[in-house]
Amino acid sequence: MTNLQSGAFLLSLPLRHSVIRHSSFVICLAFGVMSSFADPPPSAKEILASVRMMESRQQIDLQGQLRQNDVIIPFQLVQNGPLIRYSFTNPDEVLQLRLGENSSRLDLVSEGEAEKFPASKLDQRIRGTSVTYEDLSFKFLYWPTARVLGEEKVRTRNCWKLQLRAPSRESQYSNVLLWVDKASGALMRMEGYDWNAQLTKRFEVVSAQKIEGRWFLKQMRVEEFQPGTNHVQARTYLEIKR
């Protein structure tokens, strides 16, 4: 899974964990290419800046789907640099994510015109899945309060583990934990915690695939937890097709 790339989870990822390629949880719950860090360890600010920079350089046009139980929701993911577009059908819905240097912006595109997605609706689920519009916006990658907790392995990959704190209660998450692949910069895992500090959602890369010589996300698992427990009450899979 070296040099795994995401298209915004596609989350961006975002999870930009390709959905999606990440993508940015791709989701993404979103990936990008980032050079290996040498000692001393990089700061959280440096890691996040590298992830954002690489996420904004992708050029992709792929088909994907969100799958929860027997429900399959197809979509098209097109990225041209910092501009990422998710197109759904039945009913038609086009979401456009712009990754800036200091912030991201999620728009709803209608009749060729882009209008800012209402902040009051960011916590709504996409087509009844565990993925919300906020998850696709990758706003957590821009939160100013972040720190490196250490190093951990995710599916044999050596990762930096980061903690990010929300700047306000506008987010459904009070803080987010990120696992960033040290070699590639890919977002391998993300955990979101509610305002009672309870784990509410986990995004994790399950598999990758090579398309035209480049690594892309193949499948990302999104688990939604019953508050205050480790019980998974829903699972959604974000999958990218060749």
Image: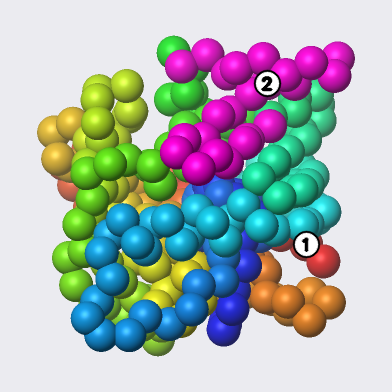
Q: Which residue is nearer to you in this view: 203 or 171?
A: 171
The mark that comes first in sequence, 1 or 2, is 2
Q: Relative to residue 226, is residue 15 depicted above or below?
A: below
Asked whether residue 181 is drawn in magenta, I would say no
Q: Relative to residue 135, is residue 133 depicted above or below?
A: above
Q: Residue at x 40, y 86 (%)?
A: 156
Q: Check disc 1 and report the residue beneath it.
A: 241
Query: Which percent across, then down, holds residue 4?
Result: 59, 73
Asked whether residue 113 is drawn in magenta, I would say yes
| Horizontal side, residue 199 vs residue 86: left or right | left
Q: What is the secondary structure assignment of the residue under circle 1? A: strand
Q: Which residue is nearer to you in this view: 182 or 29?
A: 182
Callout 1 environment at 10 Å: few (<14), some (14 to 19), or many (20+)? some
| Horizontal side, residue 221 vs residue 154: left or right | right
Residue numbers of the magenta segment: 96-119
| Quadrant for the N terminus in the image | bottom right
Q: What is the secondary structure assignment of the residue under circle 2? A: strand
Say what amino acid the circle numbered 2 marks.
Leu
Q: Is residue 193 visible in the rendered structure shown here?
A: no
Classify residue 178 by image quadrant: bottom left
Q: Are marks 1 and 2 in contact (CB under 8 Å)?
A: no
Q: Disc 1 or disc 2, which is closer to the eye?
A: 2
Callout 2 environment at 10 Å: few (<14), some (14 to 19), or many (20+)? some
Query: Which percent across, then down, holds residue 9?
Result: 57, 51
Q: Relative to residue 73, is residue 205 depicted above or below?
A: below
Say what amino acid the circle numbered 1 marks.
Lys
Q: Residue at x 62, y 67 (%)?
A: 5
Query: Which percent across, then down, holds residue 134?
Result: 47, 32
Q: Check disc 2 and report the residue beneath it.
A: 108
Query: Which percent across, then down, holds residue 116?
Result: 60, 17
Q: Residue at x 50, y 68 (%)?
A: 186
